[in-house]
Structures are given as structure tokens and as C-alpha cells.
Image (cartoon, rainbow, N blue to C red):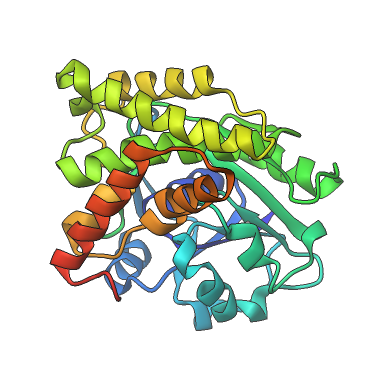
Amino acid sequence: MKVAVVGAGAMGSLFGGLLAEQGHAVTLIDVNAAHLDAIRAQGLRLQTGSGDRYVTALGACRPPEAREPPDLLVVFTKTLHTAGALSGVAHLLGPGTQVLSLQNGLGNVEAIRQHVALDRILIGVTTWPADLAGPGHVRSHGQGIVRLMSADGQLRPKQAEAVRALQEAGLCCTADTAVWSAIWEKVAFNAALNGICAVSGCTVDQLGGVADGQALAFAVADEVMSVAHAQGIEANAEACKARIADAIAHHVGHKPSMLQDVLAGRKTEVEAIHGAVVAAAAVHGVPVPHTRTLLQLVRLVEARAGTAAA
């Protein structure tokens, strides 16, 4: 397959690198000049459970420099940048291009629909951890999965092709008709781990340092699951909490993306995660005190860093 990854940070580079190792024609598209330069100069350094190596058979460029429409365009930008990122690569959206969002938060399908029809959108979630260790250098600790589905709920051959490519790349990918349940479970996972780590400065495994860390994460997850259930989505609270516990036990040293953003002084995805949950909770009259508090605390952290209006 011809694959373009828009938003080639830690997650985008991990997925792009693993797909390139399987022989797919991958182009990483980003605006981080240092990252792109390092990849072009020496390849993408990947440190995973499979070893420490350089992936050289892949392209790296800024949005205007990408030329050939891909079969699959994977979006890994933050939700707040989705619309702008797709506008920047509109010339790559050929009539046969499928767009896959494995982004955090809510609202991504709505943004992508401004550019391609619903039957060309694949929506899903991933629990793979990844850290950008430096320009051209990505680390991934522990294991993860990918669950995806056509955004309109219909099974199509191109969806199966994308699933097969990700599965063969070792990304544990499956097609899942209950993808919206998976999305809300991922929102709960992120609301818990990203939010708490962002305001505490802890890595994921450090949340296990005291019983209160995991207990707070579970409380946030339960609140988000209550909102999902109020919307008629059959998300599995116990499965979500089991993944949180597994991450705390095994994602050693991992800094979630929201903590990475805080440390770098960047705007976070708190509005697409905690903010979206709090807004939906208000519509359905569901109390979410822990989630609301994390939203308020991250907003304070952003304001202190001067990123709230960025």
C-alpha cells in the first residue's frame, strides 16, 4: 500500500515505521523540521520490544512537499489540528484514498467529513504507547492494540486491507463493529491516565506508587463510562479499568501525550477529551466531578504556560 501519515510525532512515526518495515511505501508528513531532517539523514530510529534499529525505507516531508495521493492516509494530529492538517494535505485526497483516524478524543469524524465522504473514513482507537525521544527517534514501551471500523459501520474490502496491513506490522489490529464503544473506552483511558499524569508529572507506571493513583484513575474512567452509557453506547467499564491497571503495571517510564505537551509548553488535547466528556455529561445530567476537576487543572497548567489561547 501507499501510506501517508499526517502528524508524524511519536505515534505517527511508530505506525509509519512499522508499516515501512513490512514493505509498504510510507511517507511521514509533519511540520517538525528537526524530526524530518533526522529521518531523511539517517532514517527513523525505532526502539521497541523487537529491538533497536533504523528504518530507512520511508519518506519524510512537510505537507506541501507530499505529492502522490496514498491508498491510506493515517491522521495522528491532535484533534484540535485535524481540520487544519487535512486542509494542508487536501491535494493528497485522491478519489480512492481512505482516511484513518486513530486520534485521541472526540470530534475527529466530524472534522474529517469536511474533506472526504463518510464511506471513505475509517475510525478507530489504539492503545500503543510511544514517546518521541528526540529528532528521528521513537521509543515504544509495552504492548497495545488497534480496533477500527468504517465510520458508517459498513464492511468494505479497503477496510480489510488496512486491517491486514496493520496486523502484519505487529500492531495487533482487528476490525470491530463496536468501534464507538472502543472509542469511548479509549476516551476514558486517556481522561484517566493523560489527565492525572499531566497535572502530577508522573509517568504512567508511577501512578502505581500509591493506591490513590490507580483509584483516582478508576474513578475518572467510571465517570466517562457513565456518560457513554447515557448516550446509549455499550462501553465496557471493567475492560477499560483492566487496561488502565495493565498500563500502570507495564508502561514503565511512559509519558502520555498530554504530559509531553505540558512539559514542552504546548497546548494539550484536554478540550477534546475531558472537555468533550464534561459537555456531554451536562447534556445528560451525569455527574463527573473528577473529570471536571482534571479539566480545570489542565486548563490552569496551560494558562500558566501561556498556551491556553495558542
Q: As displayed, is residue 279 above or below residue 193?
A: below
Q: Can I make out residue 133 in this image?
A: no
Q: Quadrant of residue 33?
A: bottom left
Residue 46 picture location, percent across and down: 35, 43
Question: Height in image: 279 above or below 83?
Answer: above
Residue plotted at (21% across, 56% down)? 262
Q: Is residue 253 left or right of residue 56?
A: left
Name the image quarter holding the C terminus: bottom left
Residue 199 visible in the displayed image:
yes
Q: Where does the image place residue 151, in percent across and percent down from the top left?
A: 74, 51
Q: Residue at x 28, y 27 (%)?
A: 216
* Residue at image coords 72%, 57%: 121
- Residue 291: image location, x then y, percent: 36, 41
Q: Residue at x 33, y 36 (%)?
A: 193
105, above or below 4, in the image: above
Q: Nearer the viewer, residue 235 or 43?
A: 235
Location of the N terminus by quadrant is bottom right
Nearer to us in this view, 196 or 22? 196
x then y, percent, for residue 12: 46, 53
- Residue closer to the observer: 181 or 243: 181
